[in-house]
Amino acid sequence: MQNLKILSLLLIIFTVSVFSQNSGLQIGDVLPNPEIIYFNNLRIKEKPLGLYDYKKDSYMLVAVMPDLSESNPSAKIILTGIDAYFAEGLSFRSFDEFRYTNPDLKVLIVTANPEDLTAKFISKYELDFEVISDENLDISNSLGINKWNSFSDASFIYIADKNNKIIYSRDDYKGEGEKLKNIQSELYACFDLKENIASDNSFSLLIQGDDARDFEFTVSGSGETKEFNLSDYYGKKNVLLAFYPAPFSYSCAYEVNKFDTYAEEQLMQRVKNSGNDDVELLMVSVSNNYILSKWKSDMGLDNLKLVNDNDGSISMKYNSFNMLGYNNRTVFLINKEGKVQYIDWDYNVNTDNDFGIIKEMLTASK
């Protein structure tokens, strides 16, 4: 009996230690005020000051990361996303009052990497935020993060209001598009910004064999704004229409790279065989042209079109808009007759199975 009590006590201690190890700050907590030393992408290092003095009554987004080296596959996509959306403020450009200036927002990154490695990384990618090298985890500890188990651990994201209260907290961020859009929505609420989302989301469910629903769209990243209609391709090309949650996210980057590479392979094959250009790839997100243009450039995407669907109206027509403010990951094949030939309502980017089916369908459609 005594041994059982001891075992139970040890189990409780182990459970508490595991679940409290990295509990982090919670919504409603007060942001601590440790002394910090930060630097920027020019490697300019500032003198020590309190976090509140750095923040200066602004809202602040803090990302606490175990690793931002090249060996961490999610580091680049996490930081370039935070940089483009919030440090550069491209996600706010759709709103007239913030078109050329960022809102009153500080963006701070805390990482366990040494300063030299950190400085090289943010300089290489020209990232526009301040960074703290926190090798001893002093700052991380003050933010409720006791240790990192490995450099592949998820990052912590906090938003603090002007009164230094935590209003947003998550401990599982690895660059997912859904979570990036969630952070964006929280910051929009901070600045009382309302997205201009279309009101008509009552479209019936598309099924294979239906007529495709026509739409007008613009393409980002071409140096100029060009307008197209889906119906422009009828009688000429098959269209692979793919909806995804957000630019600058991990799975979405993998998806567009795979589709872009496929399009390039098809182009080379057509040149070799003197064939016709009979497949168009359209990737659709609820975003804006500023973010899409930068993502297209950063990713080196040359063979597909990134479609701006800022109000979600295209996504709604194809039953792909999630009311949380981003797209579900869906894929449609529209044939040359303007018919919906194939639908994947839950496209999986992490296996080759779904992509293999799409390639087979495209091959059969030629």
Image (cartoon, grey):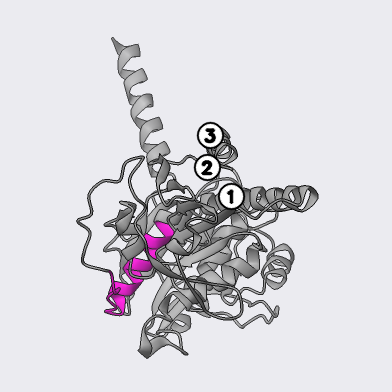
Disc on res. 226: none
Residue 192 on the magenta segment:
yes
SS category of the residue bearing label 1: helix
Q: Is 211 rendered above or below residue 124?
A: above
Picture coordinates of residue 300, whole percent (x, y) = 67, 63
For the residues labelled 2 and 3, the Cα–Cα distance comes to 12 Å
Among the 4 quarters of the image, the one containing residue 27: bottom left
Side of 298 relative to 103 (left or right): right
Seen in the image, is 138 located left or right of residue 168? right
Q: Overall secondary structure of the magenta stretch?
A: helix
The C terminus lies in quadrant: top right
Instruction: State the quadrant of the N terminus.
Output: top left
**Residue identified by numbered label 2:** 349
Mark 1 vs 3, N-terminal side: 1
Q: Do the residues labelled 2 and 3 touch (CB within 8 Å)?
A: no
Marks 2 and 1, how far apart in space?
A: 7 Å
Q: Mark 3 points at which residue?
A: 357
Regarding residue 251, the answer to whether it shows in the image is: yes
Q: Which one is closest to the eye, mark 1 or mark 3?
A: 3
Q: Which amino acid does label 1 sit on?
A: Tyr
Name the quadrant containing residue 220: bottom right
Q: Give the range drawn in magenta.
A: 179-197
- Dot 1 corresponds to which residue? 254
* Nearer to me, 254 or 75: 254
Q: Which of marks 2 and 3 is nearer the N terminus?
A: 2
Assess whether mark 1 and mark 2 are in contact (beta carbons under 8 angstroms).
yes
Q: Residue furthest right?
A: 272
Q: Is mark 3 on a helix, strand or loop?
A: helix
